[in-house]
Structure formats: structure tokens, C-alpha cells
Image (cartoon, rainbow, N blue to C red):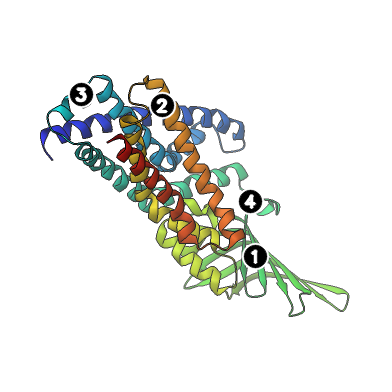
Amino acid sequence: MNTIERYIARVVFSSFAALALIILGLDLLFSFLTELGDTRNQYQFVDAMMFMLMTTPRRLYEYLPLLAMIGALVGIGRLANNSELVILRAAGMSTYRIVYAVMKAAFFLMLVGFLLGQLVVPVSEEYAQTSKAIKMADGKVQLSGKKKGFWHKESSEFVHFSLVEPSGKLHGVTRYKFEADQQLESIEYSKMAEYTDGQWRLYDTELTRFSNNKTQVEQIPEKIWDVSLQPALLSVIVLKPDYLAMTDLYDLSDYLEQQGLDASSFKLSFWRKAYQPLAIGALVLIGISFVFGPLRSVAMGTRLFYGIITGLSFKYLQDFMGPAATVFGIEAWLAALLPTVLCAILGWLMLKRAG
């Protein structure tokens, strides 16, 4: 990378960094004010601050494509406003070489996004969500209702967990077992489940059996739970699909399909993560083409407005493709790729038209 390319990359990256501080700062401020409304029991002011800190990588990961596009738009716009683009092109630097220099800076953001999505976000988000739930429950997690918590299905059993700790310990485990004719056979409630010595153990269990219009209740202090659910899969139960690592999404999709369950949302999240570097590149291309094309001589505020609208449109199109893939039977990889392809084509056509 020569001196001019380094200069262009530095201008674009400094614009990205400034925007990241502003947008993340505003998001954290308003989210923190909302978070204070959840303070109760052991979850207090300091815990809310720690929760915001631990969820910051996830927020940055979600904003990264939008920030990359607006950063390119603002950075190249600064060069245009200072007539530096005119000088660069008069010196013989082509439009595509300028695009190449910006893409080198965007590559760093792609790498940051990949590392955040794979290594940082799954760990920090799981810790934040479970720590908050434990402290808000104030040691009474086993009494929480069925409106909250997590559901899991295996064979003829539907299982509800009131709370899942990062260590793999389960609280408030309710198992609903059905017969072949879909009649309820039994309900089993355990205050806690723990994975030790390669198997699950249930503690303080109350088993209720239903047969011949009668119920039979049995108290069991401790028992073995024969289930194929592994502790490694618990994090994917706690977190939303978009917050999981690609490896976890792949494993969970395979597991759900083996259980005869719908795994489309996890497949879609997997491919979105896989294509995020391409999405960043496509949005950066649109940001550059705006400056060389229709937004070359407008004010910075106007560029920011169009950049935000374009980024939000891309996000809404991504969100729309999820239900559309289910309704129209579109493959998950294609549904996740389509918004990126459309952005790349639009950016390329605008750039080519600008010359």
C-alpha cells in the first residue's frame, strides 16, 4: 500500500471510528436508561453498568455494516469537499484505484466483524444475559413461571428450563412426556439439573403420572436424566441465533433436524454471519458510489441522511428475507445472500455510471 492509499484508508477509518463512538455512545446511553428500570433484588446500578459493558461487542457487531458504509461515505465525502478527489484523479489515480484503497480499510472491518461474531459476542452475551437473570431472580429461579425461560424438545418430551447458568447448571426443569397417541403421560418438575460424570442428574424432583383418570405423585431426591442434550448446546438455548458463533449454529441446526424440528432460523443466521464480510464490502461500495455519483456536491448532513436510510433499508431487507424464505421455500443460503448481491450490483452500476 503506497502513501496515497494509506492516506485514503486512514481518512476512511478515522471517519468510521468517530461514527462508532457517537452511535455506540448514544445507543449505550439510551439502553442504560432503559436498563435502570430492571434494577431490583440483587441486580443494581453497578450490575446494569456491567451488563452494558458486556453487551457492547454485540452492539458493535450489529452496527458494523452500517458504520462501515457511512464511514466510507463520510471519509470519501471529506476528500471530495476538500477537492482532494479532484487532485488525486488529476494526478492519474483512477476511480477504481480509489475504491481499491477504501476496500483495503474495509477489509480490516470485515476481520473485526468475523472475530467479534465468532469469538467475543457469544461469550460476552451469554455471560451478560445469564448473570442478569440470576441476580434479578434473587435465588428464586426455580419458582419462575412458564412465560419466561427456554424450551427444548427431544423425542416425545417437551422440556422447559426456567434458567440456564453459564456453567451448564439448569434451574426449574419441567418435563412434559407424551404417549404415542399424544396423550399426556407425565409431568416431572426438578428444582435443579447438573451435568456430572458424563450424565445429567436431577435434584428435588416431583413426578406426576396420569393414568386411568387418576394421578400419582412421587417425590424423588435425586435421579439420572437420560437425554442426548449436551452442556455445549446450552449456550445456543440461552442466546438468540444472531448472537451465536457459526460453529454453534451449524451444530444446533444439525441437532434440531435430527429431532425433527424446524432449524430454518438458525440456518439463516449461519449464512448471514458467513456473508457479513461480503455485506460490509457491498455497503462500502454503495457509500463510495454515492460520493462519486449523486451525492458528490451535497452537504455532509445530506450524505449522512442518505447513508442511514440506505443502511436501514439493507437491514430491513435482511429481516424481510427471513419470513419470505419460510413462506416461499427459499433456501437459507440464498435468502441471506440476496440483499448483499442486490447492494453490490446497485453500487457497481452507480459507480460505473459515474465513470
- Which callout, 1 or 4, points at the residue further toward the start of the chain? 4
The numbered dot on residue 84 is 3
Q: Which tag is nearer the camera, tag 4 or tag 2? A: 2
Q: Is residue 75 or residue 355 the one in the foreground? A: 355
Please provide percent x and percent y for residue 18. 33, 27
Please give the residue where the numbered disc 2 appears in the rendered image: 304
Q: Which mark is residue 159?
A: 1
Badge nearest the viewer, 4 or 3: 3
Mark 3 element type: helix
State left or right for residue 275 relative to residue 128.
Answer: left
Decide if residue 60 is in sight here.
no
Neighbor class of circle 3 (other Cα within 10 Å; few <14, some 14-19, many 20+) is: some
Observer able to see residue 226: yes
Q: Look at label 1 and name its amino acid.
A: Val
Name the mark nearer the viewer: 2 or 1: 2
The three-letter code of the residue at mark 4 reads Val
| Residue that extends furthest to the right in the rendered view of this protein | 213
- Amino acid marked by disc 3: Glu
Mark 1 / mark 3, whichever is N-terminal: 3
